[in-house]
Image (cartoon, rainbow, N blue to C red):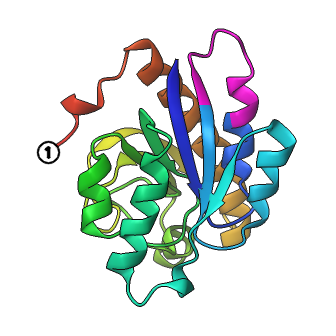
Amino acid sequence: MLKLVVLISGTGSNLRALLEATLAEDFGARVVAIGADRDAEGLALGEEFGIPTFTVPFTSFPDRASWGDELLAQVQQWSPDLVVLSGMMRLVPPRFVAGLTPNLLNTHPAYLPEFPGAHGVRDAIDAGVDQSGASLIIVDNSVDGGPIVVQERVGVLPGDTEHDLHERIKPVERRLLIQAVRDIATGHINLKEFSTQ
């Protein structure tokens, strides 16, 4: 059984979908802990699904490196096989990446390497493209530049707002994440084959 720690910053909508998927007996993975960099709304999913939670507030540390060291220590207490950044809106520092890669994944609402960064959906709208997408990557020390595990195109419709497009990307992101976790658990995906480190 693949053990997951999921890190969030917000409502945990991707996390909820993943937790619901893991309820299937044959899924092959389970979330053992949920962590956040703030008092995130999605931490309530821990109580709902009976999963321990922890918080490592970024603002409680003098710098990103010391915050990352504590976050890594908290994550490693659960001995996870896989760590998923699911809507965590903060860059993790190099020592955190080094401690977990290649078993450190991040979802992104764009078809990477197009539109990396915190505003991928807005950037796609602003660029006037007719398609964007969703990606699941192995986290490295770049901004959304790590090896791509899986991705899928999502069309941009005439008149789309940032909200409209994001709402169509979200279910694709969730599906890609759930399928990839299942494939990692069953051995159909070997993250070491993607890793450049």
Seen as rendered, the residue at the extreme left is 197
Q: Residue at the location (43% across, 67% down)?
A: 70
Between 93 and 10, the one nearer to me in the picture: 93
> In the displayed structure, would residue 154 be above or below residue 23?
below
Binning the other alpha carbons within 10 Å of mark 1 as few (below 14), some (14 to 19) or many (20 upward) gives few
Q: Quadrant of residue 22?
A: top right
Q: Which residues are magenta?
A: 19-30
Q: Does any portion of residue 157 appear in the rendered image?
A: no
Classify residue 177 as left or right of residue 161.
Answer: left
Between 169 and 157, the one nearer to me in the picture: 169
Q: Residue at the location (73% across, 51% down)?
A: 13
Tell me the element at label 1. Answer: loop
> In the displayed structure, would residue 15 be above or below residue 82?
below
> In the displayed structure, would residue 132 be above or below residue 195?
below
Q: Residue at the location (51% across, 59% down)?
A: 130
Label 1 amino acid? Thr
Classify residue 30 as left or right of residue 151.
Answer: right
Q: Residue at the location (61% across, 27% down)?
A: 30
**Image location (x, y in percent) of residue 149:** 35, 37
Seen as rendered, the residue at the extreme bottom is 62
